[in-house]
Amino acid sequence: GENVEQHPSTLSVQEGDSAVIKCTYSDSASNYFPWYKQELGKGPQLIIDIRSNVGEKKDQRIAVTLNKTAKHFSLHITETQPEDSAVYFCAASAPNNAGNMLTFGGGTRLMVKP
Amino acid sequence: DGGITQSPKYLFRKEGQNVTLSCEQNLNHDAMYWYRQDPGQGLRLIYYSQIVNDFQKGDIAEGYSVSREKKESFPLTVTSAQKNPTAFYLCASSFRVSTDTQYFGPGTRLTVL
């Protein structure tokens, strides 16, 4: 089955700096890669996603890049703000008998220092 | 106001008791999912349902049961057979079990006393 590794597990940056979180996946058939932000005690919220036919996607201060050959994808947050502090999860969706199921990385705790 | 709701937010259970967590969605999604999240870890799939009256085991289904009698509802029962049930439980839904976006509810924190 699919295996998703996420690094780093914690990341501390100064307000205004950029943050980069990286994920690798094992199943070359994976074709959908969402990123979720989870605040303390809440459910994850989708912040950006990318499909395998695209190499990069951007939405204001956040961007995701995908390298299918190397089987890794990354989340980039520019001009970080204290409200960006949260746990971020990557996921990869690979087909199985029932359809495509998400496999999640272990999460990255991002702390933005004011 | 569309979305996914879960209740209760906090739940306490004595050892040996079954407990049912509620999940409701009004997004007209066919697919629904239950995940378990342990502190500092990612999400693991317990059960999923592609359509009414159908559900499939995920990676960690032992000790759990579900039903899908209505499109809007996908309750999860944590049985006494679940050895370590204390965790944060998340429900999600999507249009289909495919590369469709999954939307999550606010979660239920279950603590076994």
Image (spheres, rainbow, N blue to C red):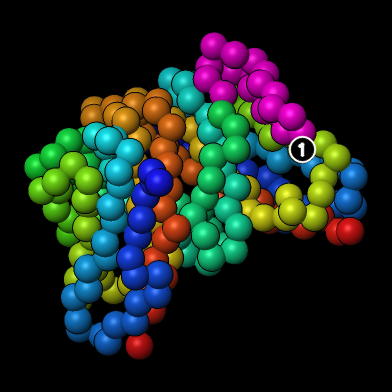
Position of the C terminus of chain A, as image quadrant, is bottom right
Residue on which the image places disc 1: A77
What residue is shown at x 22% (from left), y 58% (from top)?
A: B75
In this rendering, position of residue B69 left or right of residue A22 = left
Residue A88: give x, y in percent of width and height.
Answer: 62, 48
Packing grade of label 1 (10 A; few <14, some 14-19, many >=20) is many
Query: Is the residue A93 above or below the residue B27 in the image?
Result: above
Instruction: Name the chief secondary structure element in magenta.
Output: strand
Which residue appears at 35% of the width and 77% of the height? Answer: B11
Q: Is residue A4 left or right of residue B51?
A: right
Q: Is residue B82 left or right of residue B113?
A: left
Residue situated furthest front in the rendering: B1
Q: Chain of mark 1?
A: A
> Where is residue B60, by image quadrant?
bottom left
Magenta span contains residue B26: no
Give the residue drawn at x 42%, y 61%. Answer: B107
Residue type beneath disc 1: Ile
Quadrant of the snapshot with the N terminus of chain A = top left
Is B16 rendered above or below residue B4? Answer: below
Front-most of residues A25 and A63: A63
- Using the rendered view, name the quadrant where residue A24 is placed: top right
Q: Is residue A63 magenta?
A: yes
| Position of residue B90 measured from the top left corner of the image (x, y, whole percent) | 39, 56
Q: Secondary structure at mark 1?
A: strand
List x then y, in percent, for residue B34. Answer: 32, 52
Percent position of residue B48, x then y: 26, 44
Nearer to me, B21 or B40: B21
In this view, A69 is above or below B58: above
Query: What residue sits 52% from the left and 50% below the top?
Result: A44
**Residue bounds of the magenta highlight:** A50-68
